[in-house]
Amino acid sequence: METNTTTETAAAKLRAEAAQHDRDAADSFERCDTDGFLSQWASGLTGQQKRLEASLIENGGTTDIIGPVTVDGEPVRFRTVDTRYGRKWLVLDDNDDAVAWLDPFAVRMSTYRKKGYTLGQYQVRGIAKIIGSGTGLASAANCYAAIVPWYATTDVNSDVDKLAKLIDVCPADVKLSDEYC
């Protein structure tokens, strides 16, 4: 019961912060019209992120993702890795050794089945982030707030073994911001 109350309080606090960001954006518009467009945009985007964090907390800090499972429907250990050839799924065995590399964007299911896998649903720890690409002010045009698996920012140079262990021990009450564990 206490955990539920704590969750409700944390979610309510984040929603209040989101509402404050919305008010900040509106106040900026009232004061400056569109001259303050950057602060208005940033306040609105941060408000969206806070609302997503609140919904994530209410969902126990988890989000649903699609990932590889065996053709029998058994879950497998896998990681999402950004390689120089694009984003891939790295399937791991019990010793965290690489078993297979799969393309998460395969067009046909037969692509997975040939390697002994199909797609299934996983519930994983999530994080609300502001996502964008590019650099400088130009990247602001395509920024958005989203809930993503908190390990999705892995690149091919990361220590996958260390990351896998970190994911497995990450506490449920982790602060859902840029502080992962």
Image (spheres, grey):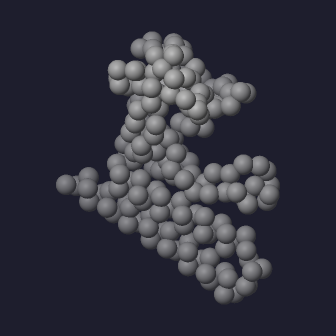
Res 89 seen here: yes
Which one is nearer the viewer's eye here, 139 or 30? 139
Return the x and y of residue 30 as percentages of the image width and height: 66, 87
Drawn side of residue 155 relative to residue 164, left or right: right
Residue at the far bottom in the pictured view: 30
Return the x and y of residue 62 as percentages of the image width and height: 40, 45
Res 92 seen here: no
Against 69, is 43 above or below? below
| Residue drawn 38% across the image and 66% down it | 12
Residue at the far left in the pictured view: 1
Which one is nearer the viewer's eye here, 98 or 113? 113
In this rendering, the count of numbered labels is 0
Return the x and y of residue 171 as percentages of the image width and height: 38, 39
| Residue drawn 22% across the image and 55% down it | 2
Which quarter shows the N terminus?
bottom left
Against 151, is 31 above or below? below
